[in-house]
Image (cartoon, helix red, strand yellow):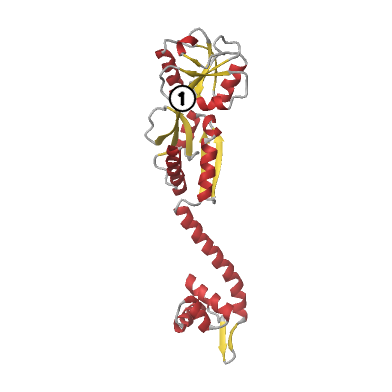
Amino acid sequence: MEFRHIRSFLSVAETLHFGRSARLLNLSQPALSLQVKALEDELGIQLLSRNRQGTVLTEAGQAFREDAAIALERLEFAKRKAQWTSAGKLGHIRIGFISTAGFEIVPNLMRRFRKSYPDVEFSIRNILTETQLEMIGDGLLDVGFLRLPIENRKEIEVTTVHREPFVAILPSWHPLSAMKEIRLRELKESPFVMYAREYAPGFHDLLIGILSNAGVVPKVVQTAGEMPTLISLVDAGVGVSIVPASVAKKIVSKATVCSIADRLPESETGLALARHHTAAVVRRFCEFARTSLNKW
């Protein structure tokens, strides 16, 4: 049963005039008649009756018309849905993000992307870097915004999408808390609270290397897997910490934020997805994210 035959029948059923429907469908009247006849032959019933008074629907034609119109509408929607999905304009994207990416990066990207692709749906979760990598590898997550560096994984594609400086966070009791800028070596005798290595090994090792180059072997008294928790520990006076600058923007505590005078590598956020991910909507979102974030 062909779509065009059903469309032709429904048009004639609406106008009850073969000539008018032929013009609406941009067909010759004989071609339209043949299409309706082909549909009737396939169904084995007469749908339309023509006489001197004009064209009328048979009882069977009336019964077929209603359900055929609904079916055709659903088929047209299915066609558009498949086309939109193939073009990356429709679908569902599962996103994982670290806390700093959740402040601005992910919300802003979603808002901007939805302006162009309002039919795309998102599921978002705050997930630690190592867990994101595992979930992407297992196909449980489509896109991850995570802390760099990470070890090379041939099955995962990673692009750096955000860079920012590190800052020092000091508790109110610290003798340097009145300073706007410090050198790392001045924290040599201070207790540290640090990001736990198990949650982002590359990020942890980067910080240890930065401190080591400054001649500081940190006395780590507490670790945590979330940046807000690190801030809370500093605020409680447990120790000092080194964090990305964006974390400091969200501080609503008595802790002091100091810029660092030493020349340091920047803290980087990466966008990760499975290298062989084929979903068009995911690829479109990642392309949009890379382009947009590079302009910010």
User: At 48% from the left edge and 53% from the top edge, which residue is drawn?
Assistant: 85
Residue 30 lies, in percent from the top left, at 45, 84
User: At 43% from the left edge and 45% from the top edge, which residue is drawn?
Assistant: 283
Q: Is residue 193 visible?
A: no
Counting every numbered tag in the picture gives 1
Residue 88 lies, in percent from the top left, at 46, 50
Residue 182 lies, in percent from the top left, at 48, 14
Identify residue for label 1.
165
Q: From the viewer's perspective, is residue 108 above or below residue 64?
A: above
Considering every residue shown, the one lying at the far bottom of the view is 52
Q: Is 66 or 99 nearer to us in this picture?
A: 99
170 horizontally vs 212: left or right: right
Q: What residue type is disc 1 on?
A: Pro
Q: Is 149 or 260 nearer to us in this picture?
A: 260
Q: From the viewer's perspective, is residue 11 above or below residue 245?
A: below
User: At 48% from the left edge and 57% from the top edge, which residue is drawn?
Assistant: 82
Q: Is 99 or 82 nearer to us in this picture?
A: 99
> Where, by quadrant of the figure, is residue 230 drawn?
top right
Name the secondary structure under disc 1.
Answer: loop
213 horizontally vs 195: left or right: left
